[in-house]
């Protein structure tokens, strides 16, 4: 057989094999790879936050603050943004912190005060007065020394009842709750709990009072001894519930909510 015929026969065989393969339904070629769509990036705004934990009473410095990116929909009124106040960190330098910040918490101008007066004047709420009362450094009239700044207390006055003392011929002491649910600003010179301390001792406790409360406490100190009764956190803002009078011993004067009553024992 001539070579030309052999070549034609070979080409025919190859073409027939290819046609047979295509007719047999073999796997189709894989589809071309599809590029992944880019993930949309949420718009953000730089907000001024505390670089570390900042306690009450500390003077804030630029190094105590930093800019942090926040989603636009999480920025609320009162946050300080870089686009509105690019030099806020420098402008707030030297201000006194009226209420402490946690690390990463947004800085709010309402919680800062310029120290135009003393430190206590800077952290004292508007309309209130700071009044210091003498307490026992051993804690015998301040819940054993467990009262800390920012706790809420009742103020109790203890004094001698002259009329009942003369009538009974014995010393009669009575107690009276003068104020309820007042905030402790400082114990001694400490205005902020430090290093997890749960016991604070000092010679004075400074309370945040209204003008009329300040007058009542000042008068009470002149005519008796003041003690502080620590309130539970759950009771802050609530008036004390009346308690049933206990069984009194002979000649004991029981006082409930400022009303004294002479009880005779059985």
Image (cartoon, rainbow, N blue to C red):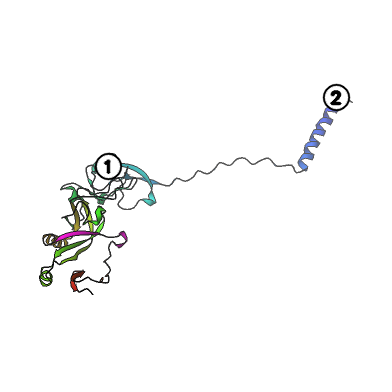
Comes first in the chain, label 2 or label 1: 2
Would you say 204 lies left or right of 77 here? left
Q: Magenta segment: does it hold 180?
A: no
Q: Position of residue 245 (x, y in %)?
A: 25, 71
Mark 1 is surrounded, within 10 Å at the Cα level, by few (under 14), some (14 to 19) or many (20 or more) other residues, namely: many
Of 96 and 17, which appears nearest the observer? 96
Disc 2 versus disc 1: distance between alpha carbons? 93 Å
Query: Residue 185 appears at what percent x and percent y?
Result: 22, 53
Q: Residue furthest top?
A: 3
Q: Position of residue 101 (x, y in %)?
A: 30, 48
Quarter of image, res 161: bottom left
Q: Residue furthest right?
A: 1
Q: Is residue 167 left or right of residue 61?
A: left
Numbered tag placed on residue 89 in the rendering: 1
Observer-nearest of 207 and 198 = 198
Quadrant that contains the N terminus: top right
The residue wearing badge 2 is 3
**Residue occupying the far front of the picture:** 266
Nearer the observer: mark 2 or 1; the answer is 1
Q: Which quadrant does the C terminus fall into?
A: bottom left
Is residue 225 covered in magenta? yes
41 or 253: nearer the viewer? 253
Image height check: is 27 above or below 182?
A: above
Q: Secondary structure at mark 1?
A: helix
Q: Which of 103/106 is in front?
A: 103
On the image, the x and y values in percent for residue 54 come to 29, 45
* Residue drawn at point x = 13 percent, y = 59 percent: 221
Residue at coordinates 27% horizontally, 42% vertically from top-left?
A: 89
Q: Secondary structure at mark 2?
A: helix
- The segment highlighted magenta reads 223-237
């Amino acid at each position: 057989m001539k070579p030309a015929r052999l070549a034609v026969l070979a080409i025919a065989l190859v073409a027939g094999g290819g046609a047979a393969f295509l007719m047999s339904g073999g796997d189709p070629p894989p589809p071309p790879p599809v590029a992944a769509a880019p993930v949309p990036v949420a718009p953000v705004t730089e907000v001024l936050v505390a670089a570390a934990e900042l306690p009450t009473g500390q003077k804030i410095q630029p190094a105590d603050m930093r800019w942090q990116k926040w989603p636009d929909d999480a920025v609320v009124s009162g946050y300080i943004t870089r686009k509105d106040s690019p030099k806020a960190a420098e402008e707030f330098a030297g201000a006194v912190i009226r209420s402490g910040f946690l690390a990463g918490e947004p800085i709010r101008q309402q919680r800062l005060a310029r120290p135009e007066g003393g430190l206590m004047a800077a952290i004292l709420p508007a309309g209130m007065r700071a009044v210091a009362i003498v307490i026992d450094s051993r804690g015998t009239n301040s819940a054993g020394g467990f009262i800390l700044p920012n706790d809420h207390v009742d103020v109790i006055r203890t004094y001698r009842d002259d009329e009942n003392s003369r009538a009974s011929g014995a010393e009669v002491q009575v107690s009276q709750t003068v104020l309820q649910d007042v905030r402790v600003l400082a114990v001694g010179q400490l205005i902020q709990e430090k290093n997890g301390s749960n016991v604070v001792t000092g010679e004075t406790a400074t309370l945040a009072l209204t003008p009329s409360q300040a007058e009542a406490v000042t008068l009470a100190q002149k005519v008796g001894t003041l003690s502080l009764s620590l309130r539970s956190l759950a009771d802050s803002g609530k008036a004390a519930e009346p308690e049933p009078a206990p069984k009194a011993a002979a000649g004991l004067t029981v006082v409930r909510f400022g009303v004294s009553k002479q009880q005779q024992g059985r």
